[in-house]
Amino acid sequence: MNSKTLMYVLKRILLAALTVWVVITITFFVSHAVPGGPFTGEKAISAAAQAALEAKYGLDKPLMEQYFTYLSDVVTKFDFGPSLKQRGQDVNDIISRGLSVSIKLGLSAAAIAAVCGIVMGAVAALKRNSVLDRCIMVFSTACVSMPSFIMGSFLLLIFSLKLGLLPANGTTAAGLILPVITLSLSPMANITRLTRSSMLDVLGQDYIRTAKAKGVSGMKIVFKHALKNALIPVITYVGPMLAYIVTGSLVVEKIFAVNGIGRAFVGSITDRDYPLIMGTTIVLASLIVIMNLVSDILYKVVDPRINLE
Amino acid sequence: MNLKKLSMHPDLDCFAPASEAEKEYMVQMRPSSTFFKDGVKRLMKNKIAVISFFVIVIITLCSIILPMFWPYKYDQMLGVRPGRPVNSSYNNLAPFEYGEKELERMAEGEKIFPHIFGTDAQGRDYFIRVVYGARISLAVGFFASLIVLVIGLTVGSISGYCGGKVDIVIMRIVDIIYSLPDMLMVILLSTVLKEVLAPLIAGTVLEKLGVNMISLFIVFGLLYWVSMSRQIRGQILSLREQEYVLAAQATGARGKWIIMKHLLPNCISVVVISTALQIPSAIFTESYLSFLGLGVNAPMPSLGSLASDALNGMNSYPYRLVIPAIVISLIVLSLNLFGDGLRDAFDPKLNG
């Protein structure tokens, strides 16, 4: 790693940290801009009780003081405070419980998307303009233009309600199959398209012709020379893919009743549980920002030809 | 022919008047094609783009015209008559079925307009709701892209033209907004804006539009302009340095001519293409938010909220999910394909 790369990496890390701070700030002030406060619910409570509650949660202090307390809690202790609607539970507990399920879901979806997408993209590029290529491209175009909630509903309708093959409820291991497939389809289609175009690009390069002229076997050309280079642009998609999976999991977990962080988030929106909304937004946003950072840096480090800036 | 090679005398043959055959060679066979005409010609050759264009036009026209003469309204509960108990025979009708009163009237020989897609759980004609949903989705996509276009164009061109410190500040802000996870911010902002805006717009014209709709537009205006402004800034920066601008300057063209004839047409293709591709993504976002219950206000339907409502009765009435799903996929797919076609036809870099 030369000094130029190091500078780039440092700059990106700084920008990512700044972004996370902006996210925390926006979520805090936006949530506190809601009129009425969290305790003006359906049930009327006495002024004394409300004052006591506000004092307990520190809501009676000036807004800026609350902001700095929150910021320091989040940054130093990673503490998002207590949930307002689920009594006796910390936002941290709810998030970590949800994340353990969601990470399983997201990682399996990402793995399936990457493996199937790369294979399909490479096959499509190698068999360019064949029937197989056409089929793969039509399939991936269809997957890209279908919103995740529609894909999920369709899969649910076909495989669990009509055919009865898989459970509709995502709380068991078998029940996670459909949500994983739903989440993986759109990233898979994107990876297929990316791999295909970059593979076609690489296959037209001089060094492939040289390898062929030297008599290198077809398999070796594909795996050692073509695919290895064709996958570099695919790295850039890792960040957006994670962002898609995170937002997609919000609806997918709603459809399949998976007890993940997405469902907690959607639930917190309907409950107006602001600490939980803030906590999940910050955690998910940081996750996306960090993954974007990693994929960007990886991309620049893996391919030295890429111009930094 | 002058055979003296070293003679300085001009060859008089070179100055002979042109013959008829030579004149014919110079005649303009057809008027020179403009950039726009060229692009349209290329676009017309792209069958997929043309088909998608017609699909979009047909869906748009249907969604505008059909509600005008359709006998049912999108929020009209057919079983509810003032002063009478609710007639539940109108609820959950299958396609081409009729309610009790309608059957009686048909027995008397009256013609009743059929419920092509049946009715929903509250006895509302489903066909007109889907048509209305498509209308809302298209309108949201169109206006959201318009907002993005205006803000992105303004900021991008300011940044590109001014350069220097202004450019640096704007681009850092753009960088940060660009790296914000958009969907999460959209959800957060629309959740909160809903609460904040509701008392503000009560009693005004805006109330009819719905708080969710307005917060959706605000969110789009706040977050989605960044990629547009980046593209336009980049375009203006690189166009300013092009050789043909230098050539135009060298031949004495004035600034206005260069901007009108060289910079603007090249920018416009980028602007049109990214606006066209912005529409499906806006529709996507709207349907996503509607599905989470943050989209348009009930009873107004959007394709996302129709699909979301259909989830509850999915086993008994699967077509209620399938129909809006197909419509939304068709809209997004054809808009995407048309946008791709536009890019292929109008992006000067790909012309080769």
Image: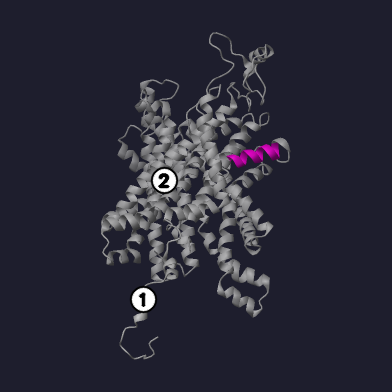
User: What residue did someone put label 1 on?
Assistant: B16
Element type at mark 2: loop
For the residues carrying marks 1 and 2, which lies nearer the camera in this image?
A: 1
Q: Give the Cα separation between the discs numbered 1 and 2.
A: 65 Å
- Where is B213 relative to A116, above or below? above
Label disc, if present, on residue B224 of the rendered structure: 2
From the top left corner, tell me how far across and down residue B248 is, in percent: 31, 64
From the top left corner, tell me how far across and down residue B202 is, in percent: 37, 24
Visible in this render: residue B157? yes
From the top left corner, tell me how far across and down residue A42 is, in percent: 45, 22
For the magenta stretch, what is the residue range?
A149-160
- Direction from residue A236 to residue A2 in the image, left or right: left
Visible in this render: residue A239? no
- Direction from residue B217 to residue A124 in the image, left or right: right
* Nearer to me, A146 or A256: A146
Label disc, if present, on residue A92 of the rendered structure: none
Numbered disc 2: what chain? B
Say whether residue A154 is magenta.
Answer: yes
Say whether residue B283 is magenta.
Answer: no
Task: Tell me if mark 1 has few (under 14), some (14-19) or many (20+) residues whose alpha carbon lies within 10 angstroms of its own.
Answer: few
- Where is B136 relative to A174, above or below? above
From the top left corner, tell me how far across and down residue A81 is, in percent: 43, 39
For badge 2, the amino acid type reads Tyr
Q: What is the magenta segment's predominant secondary structure?
A: helix
- Direction from residue A208 to residue B197 in the image, left or right: left
- Where is A118 relative to A26, above or below? below
Asked where in the image residue B318 lies, by quadrant, the reply is top right
Asked where in the image residue A120 lies, by quadrant, the reply is bottom right
